[in-house]
Image (spheres, coloured by chain):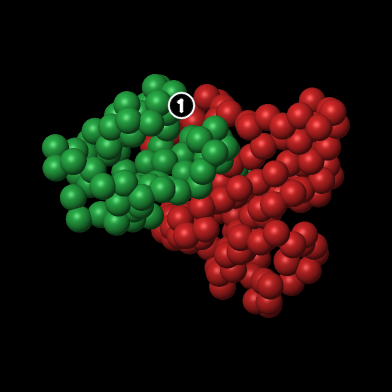
Chain colours: A red, B green
């Protein structure tokens, strides 16, 4: 099972997890990224490359399935205006065993941060806007997988 | 050739795309970027290490040839997730 979505609509984590409808699958692991309340941020504006972003998420799912023993994978990333507290990204996998499930989530998020053409801009309470720069720590985490 | 811009690059240039007929001497992404910088005063192109590129929706390095390609996308390092 694979479900990949770039969307502006908010999503419900519980509803998304029901997509794993495989009885007796063993393990589900997931990560949800949420807009943080910091730097007097009111919202994030997320821009994406409309063609490359979907292709990059599918490529990421391919690599997760090659590297780990997975039964299913869900990757959802939002774009547009996202308020503080709203979900940005959701990655979930199902597997027969927990280690593959948990490792796959870590790998997927580290790679997503550097490989998928998405860009975030902070919209602060005073109306100012600031593009977020790529963090060296994110690059290092992605490169640490060495594959 | 269609040149498309995203995120901070798009915002600083004030345009999301333009069409450029490059001289025959322009063979690579790097040469195309330097041509755009010199002919249009695009200061944001000064630091090429802070830019990423794609040719026909595939990530491309600075030394990638542009011959036969229809679109060059120029954007900052990604910050999703």
Residue for point 68% across, 72% down: A19
| Residue A128 occupies quadrant | top right
Q: Which residue is mark 1?
A: B44
Residue for point 58% across, 65% down: A4
| Residue A130 occupies quadrant | top right
Residue for point 46% across, 39% down: B75
In the image, taking residue A44 as reference, residue A60 lies left or right, namely left
Residue A108 horizontal/vertical position (percent): 54, 48
The image shows residue B33, relative to residue A21, as above or below, that is above
Quadrant of image for the N terminus of chain A: bottom right
Residue for point 51% across, 43% down: B15
Could you tell me which secondary element the residue under label 1 belongs to?
Answer: helix
User: Tag count in the figure?
Assistant: 1
The image shows residue A60, relative to residue A16, as above or below, that is above
- What chain letter is assigned to the residue under label 1? B
Residue A58 horizontal/vertical position (percent): 48, 61
């Amino acid at each position: 099972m694979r479900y990949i979505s770039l969307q502006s609509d908010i999503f419900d984590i519980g509803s998304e997890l029901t997509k794993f409808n495989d009885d007796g699958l063993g393990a589900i692991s997931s990560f949800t990224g949420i807009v943080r309340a910091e730097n007097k941020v009111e919202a994030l504006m997320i821009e994406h490359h409309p063609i490359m972003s979907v292709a990059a998420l599918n490529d990421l799912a391919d690599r997760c399935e090659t590297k780990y023993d997975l039964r299913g994978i869900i990757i959802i990333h939002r774009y547009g205006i996202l308020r503080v507290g709203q979900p940005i990204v959701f990655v979930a996998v199902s597997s027969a065993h927990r280690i593959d499930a948990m490792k796959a989530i870590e790998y997927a998020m580290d790679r997503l941060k550097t490989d998928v053409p998405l860009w975030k801009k902070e919209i602060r309470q005073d109306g100012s806007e600031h593009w977020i720069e790529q963090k060296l720590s994110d690059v290092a985490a992605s490169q640490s997988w060495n594959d | 050739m269609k040149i498309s811009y995203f995120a901070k690059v798009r915002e600083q240039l004030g345009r999301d795309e333009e069409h450029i007929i490059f001289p025959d001497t322009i063979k690579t992404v790097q040469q195309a970027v330097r041509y755009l910088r010199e002919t249009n005063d695009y200061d944001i192109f000064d630091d090429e290490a802070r830019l990423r590129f794609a040719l026909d929706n595939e990530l491309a390095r600075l030394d990638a040839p542009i011959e036969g390609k229809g679109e060059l996308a120029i954007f900052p390092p990604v910050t999703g997730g």
